Amino acid sequence: MSGESFDRRAAAGGTADRRVALVVIWRGPFPSYFDLFLASCAANPEITWLIVGDHAGHGAAPQNVRFVPLSVDDVNRRIRDRLGVETRITWTYKYCDLKPMYGVLFADHLHGFTHWGHCDLDIVWGRFANFLTADLFDRYPRIQESGHLAIFRNDAEANRFYALEAPGFVTWRGVLAHPDYYFYFDEWPGINRILEHHGVPRAPVAAFADLLAVPASYRLYGRPNHRLQAFYWHHGRVFREFVDEKTGRVGREEFLYIHLQKRRLPPPPFTRIPDLGYWITPHGFVPRLSAEPDRKTIRAMNRPSWRHRAFVARWRAGNLWRKLTGRDRRPPGSIQGLARG
């Protein structure tokens, strides 16, 4: 399989009728800020979200967010019938390992879409069209490469990327053989390395704000940080405002989305989104009062959260307890070695 073959096929296609569906499996209560997630989806009408799980709907959902009620047993039956593997997945986080397989598992809900992808719900979206251009969809079989967002061309070849293998890396059959372990098959220990091995071309990764899970203030993973920085949403777009350490001037940077991983935030204190948008802070969501914030405001909108520090301490203690008691969800030794076959 060569990158050249993908480029030739893509060059022959157009994007006028491009349709993208993002699939997420979710069970249990939605995040406290789910209405803000939905509002950010509504600002991207060219994208459709399919939320698979326990919920038949939600009062604030826009037209481009659809709910697909499927039980735990329903999903396991789909794995058996469409992938030919008998398994019993009950641990919700395990669904992350299935993400590269969604194109096959949910093919009946993806008819008419030119692309499908997977995402998370602990996200506030920015403007897709400002980052993911028609040229990217034309040229590449996959766009973005994170567990919290990846998009694939909806064709027979790309939908079977999950079945490719690479020496020393986890296989999809090995992943399904261990329903209680999470192998990170949706990211670099799995599908990303496998596609790299097969020379599948990688689209340039759009800038997104992936928050580090541990710090009590907001710090980004894989991107430069500033001593004074804060994040906000306004008119369908996600921004970081910061003070440049060299010049002392306030700068601004736009992102495709902000990923609020491991953040337990209270519900927004407003029912209608303020005209100037809202700050996304370690303490929750705060109405934005000025279009030109000063250093004091930026500092205040990223104050460390003692509540989050307490959560991280409990989280780490729980991980340690699971390891000491043998209840760790990850397999012992090499995850690649265990999942071969």
Image: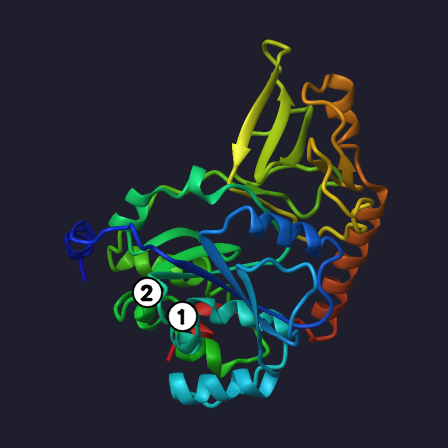
Contact (Cβ within 8 Å) of mark 1 with mark 2: yes
x, y (%) of residue 159?
33, 69
As shown in the figure, which amino acid type bears the numbered disc 2?
Answer: Asn
Residue drawn 73% across the image and 24% down it? 298
Residue ranking furthest to the top? 247
Residue drawn 39% across the image and 43% down it? 132
Which quarter of the figure has residue 243?
top right
Q: Is residue 286 left or right of residue 12?
A: right
Q: Secondary structure at mark 2?
A: loop
Q: Which corner quadrant holds the C terminus?
A: bottom left
Near mark 1 (Cα within 10 A), the count class, few <14, some 14-19 or many ≥20, is many
x, y (%) of residue 170?
41, 69
> Would you say residue 332 is visible in this rendering?
no
Q: Nearer the viewer, residue 40 or 254?
A: 40
Residue drawn 33% across the image and 73% down it? 163
Residue 110's tag is 1
Mark pair 1, 2: CA separation: 8 Å
Q: Is residue 57 above or below residue 219?
A: below
> Would you say residue 214 is visible in this rendering?
yes
x, y (%) of residue 327?
70, 75
Which quarter of the figure has residue 84?
bottom left
Q: How many numbered discs sit on the rendered protein?
A: 2
x, y (%) of residue 128?
46, 44
Residue tagged 2: 154
Q: Nearer the viewer, residue 137 or 168?
A: 137
